[in-house]
Amino acid sequence: MKSFTLIELIISVVIFFLIGSAVVSVFNISQTSFRDDIHYVDLQQRARNAINGMTREIRQSSPANVSISSDWDQISFLIPGVTNSFNYSFVNQTIVRQHPTNVTRDIVTNVSNVTFCVWKGSSCCDSASEDCTLFNEVLIDLTLSKTVMQRGFTFSLTEKVRLRNE
């Protein structure tokens, strides 16, 4: 009867160890990638929901009824048939919606940057030196960032909103 030598057993154990290590490594990499994708998709969904809600309301306004702050992080506008103005502002990494007066609601958190500007075709209109009521598009540039388990995730989204022609 023939049996295995000690060398053959050691070689087979080493080979199985290498194969097992490779399988565990692939599993860990795929699990990390899956978790990262979940956090990135979360940022995408929250940014898209925020942009869609703001776009839907801003689109109903006309250029004459839109006011943007000088540092471009706040927009106020009127919608025909509604007496109180709508206001979106960037406060403590959150976009806050105010309507009616003194009634606020957080739209999205983990905001690292937001810019509202009247778009004039290739750049933002400078209200200090130009008449921005001549243009009928508002640009919203939104960036969300968060850190999970010492990994940073960032998602940016830009939307141009065409205003009413009234």
Image (tube, rainbow, N blue to C red):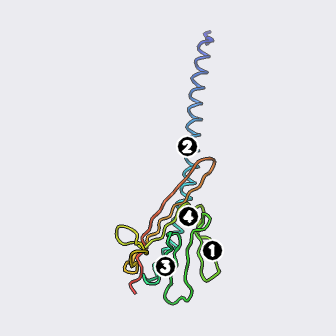
Q: Quadrant of residue 43?
A: bottom right
The residue wearing badge 3 is: 67
Of badges 4 and 3, nearer the viewer stands: 3
Three-letter amino acid code at the position of disc 3 = Ser
149 left or right of 86 in image: right
The residue wearing badge 4 is: 46
Three-letter amino acid code at the position of disc 2 = Ser
Mark-to-mark CA distance, 4 and 2: 24 Å
Note whether 141 is above or below 11 in the view shown: below
Residue contact between numbered discs 4 and 2, judged by CB atoms under 8 Å: no
The residue wearing badge 1 is: 105
Q: Earlier in the sequence, mark 4 or mark 1?
A: 4
Of badges 4 and 1, nearer the viewer stands: 1
Q: Secondary structure at mark 1?
A: strand
Q: Earlier in the sequence, mark 1 or mark 2?
A: 2
Of badges 4 and 2, nearer the viewer stands: 4
Callout 3 environment at 10 Å: few (<14), some (14 to 19), or many (20+)? many
* Residue at far top of view: 1
Callout 4 environment at 10 Å: few (<14), some (14 to 19), or many (20+)? some
The residue wearing badge 2 is: 30
Residue sitting nearer the eye, 57 or 139 = 139
What residue is rendered at 47% in x and 83% in y?
65
Note whether 74 is above or below 7 in the view shown: below
What residue is rendered at 51% in x and 90% in y?
81
Q: Quadrant of the C terminus?
A: bottom left
Position of residue 152 measured from the top left corner of the image (x, y, whole percent): 57, 50
Of badges 1 and 3, nearer the viewer stands: 3
9 left or right of 136 in image: right
Q: Earlier in the sequence, mark 4 or mark 3?
A: 4
